[in-house]
């Protein structure tokens, strides 16, 4: 436990200083590292430009390696202070460092080697092993009142049954009986969460600025939630842990965004998607707000659900599902599969609803959708939903 609470000025500087450094270091390293990546033939062709990409559209790939490395470097440097001011966070901090480092490495290997899908699913599960092996926290989940009947067993007797039924009907908040120990399933859940966050960001991609943009909106939403919790004095350790990790992450992501924004000078690569995805999983798990985290990932959940027929090969899935550039109009339009049906992505659904638009406008619209869903997430979390599902 924390022996004495450090002054808030020290706390603030523990976030602001690394974040400022993270931004500057990332911003100034990217052009330099881009040259090395190009020399090593690590580039992608910008498919959303000119219709058919040409050699002129060579864009250095896997630049997520820069914010990733910067983040790890700064966490290492601030570790002595973080641990001395918050000894109880030692284990969460060290295991997070292991897991993120591992995922960053695996993400970079994906950019170099282009793993097949089954491997892409396996990588985050492997990387979550360090996190899971040292996880000493609770394996109980706070079950929504409406769902307590799932855990009713005949052994629990009639009283237990009637409690479950009355829970379902009245949904009264803060019932202590709703804390349910799911034991080993919690470890499975942590692994699945890492697989979901990393891959769901990676498949909601293909237009300039989207991968890093959505990550910034998600990080901003989580940070807002954490700062609110800190202000209210609830889940202080968890929130503080999350802020310490997400501050430098958001700062370095914003620096990357400057280069990845339309027209992209660099691509973030799978390296960045896995890096950002695993950070969200890590802060959600060790910060004890993994259900709230999912509220901020609603567009990713939606995109995943829409994608299922293609992901499971029920309908054909081309190598790239990103929208198609129309040379004549200069706009992006819904992309189609070989059998004529449209590629099943949220990006295409938005294009279908709003009509064709320029790539940069499409990114803006999708990020507004992300912000809108975050607003809905906050409404659910703090509004009526807090007593219904998040008691
Ligand atoms: C995922 C998507 C794929 C999408 C791709 C785009 C699924 C199952 N997979 O694959 O449909 O096309 O991401 O990132 O949904 N690119 C651009 N403009 C951008 C970003 C990327 O043209 O703004 C192209 C570049 O050629 C770049 C390549 O996409 O080299 C990167 O693709 P990669 O991240 O390797 O694809 P996946 O993650 O496998
Ligand atoms: Mg990718």
Image: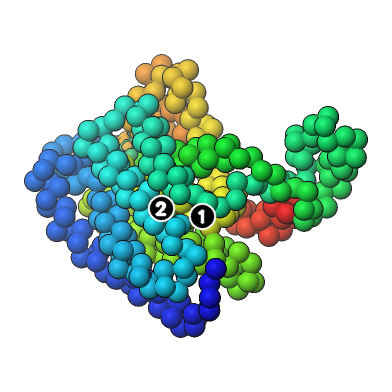
* Residue tagged 2: 95
Contact? badges 2 and 1 (CB < 8 Å): yes
Position above or below: 360 against 318: below
Residue 114 location in percent, x, y?
26, 32
* Residue tagged 1: 286
Report the residue that reaches farthest toward the left.
39
Residue 130 location in percent, x, y?
40, 46
Q: Residue at x 18, y 42 (%)?
A: 43
* Mark 2 or mark 1: whose residue is earlier in sequence: 2
Count of numbered badges drawn on the protein? 2
Q: Residue at x 31, y 27 (%)?
A: 116
Q: Residues within 10 Å of mark 2 (few under 14, many from 20)?
A: many
Residue 355 location in percent, x, y?
47, 40
Position above or below: 315 against 173: above
Asked if disc 1 is less than 8 Å from ligand 2, the answer is: no
Q: From the viewer's perspective, is 37 left or right of 330?
A: left
């Amino acid at each position: 436990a924390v022996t004495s609470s450090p002054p808030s000025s020290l706390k603030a500087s523990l976030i602001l200083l690394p974040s400022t450094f993270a931004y500057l270091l990332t911003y100034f390293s990217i052009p330099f590292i881009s040259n090395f990546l190009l020399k090593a033939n690590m580039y992608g062709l910008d498919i959303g430009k000119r219709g058919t990409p040409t050699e002129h559209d060579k864009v250095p790939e896997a630049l997520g390696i820069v914010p990733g490395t910067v983040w790890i470097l700064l966490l290492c440097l601030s570790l002595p202070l973080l641990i001395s001011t918050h000894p109880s966070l030692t284990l969460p901090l060290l295991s997070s460092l292991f897991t993120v480092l591992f995922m960053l490495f695996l993400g970079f290997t994906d950019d170099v080697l282009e793993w097949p899908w089954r491997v892409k699913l396996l990588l985050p599960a492997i990387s979550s092993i360090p996190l899971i092996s040292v996880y000493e926290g609770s394996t109980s989940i706070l079950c929504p009142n409406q769902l307590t009947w799932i855990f009713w067993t005949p052994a629990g007797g009639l009283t237990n049954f009637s409690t479950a039924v009355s829970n379902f009907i009245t949904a009264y908040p803060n019932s202590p009986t709703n804390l349910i120990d799911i034991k080993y399933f919690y470890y499975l859940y942590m692994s699945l969460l890492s697989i979901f966050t990393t891959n769901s960001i990676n498949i909601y991609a293909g237009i300039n600025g989207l991968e890093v943009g959505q990550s910034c909106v998600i990080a901003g939403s989580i940070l807002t939630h954490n700062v609110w919790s800190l202000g209210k004095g609830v889940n202080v350790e968890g929130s503080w842990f999350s802020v310490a990790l997400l501050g430098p992450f958001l700062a370095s992501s914003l620096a990357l965004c400057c280069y990845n924004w339309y027209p992209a000078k660099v691509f973030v690569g799978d390296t960045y998607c896995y890096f950002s995805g695993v950070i969200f999983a890590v802060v959600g798990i060790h910060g004890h707000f993994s259900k709230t985290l999912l509220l901020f990932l609603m567009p990713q959940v939606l995109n995943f659900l829409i994608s299922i027929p293609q992901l499971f090969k029920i309908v054909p899935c081309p190598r790239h599902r990103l929208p198609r550039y129309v040379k004549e109009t200069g706009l992006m339009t819904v992309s189609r599969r070989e059998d004529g049906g449209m590629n099943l992505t949220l990006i295409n659904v938005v294009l279908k609803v709003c009509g064709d638009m320029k790539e940069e406008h499409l990114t803006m619209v999708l990020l507004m959708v992300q912000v809108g869903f975050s607003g809905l997430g906050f409404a659910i979390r703090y509004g009526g939903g807090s007593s219904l599902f998040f008691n």
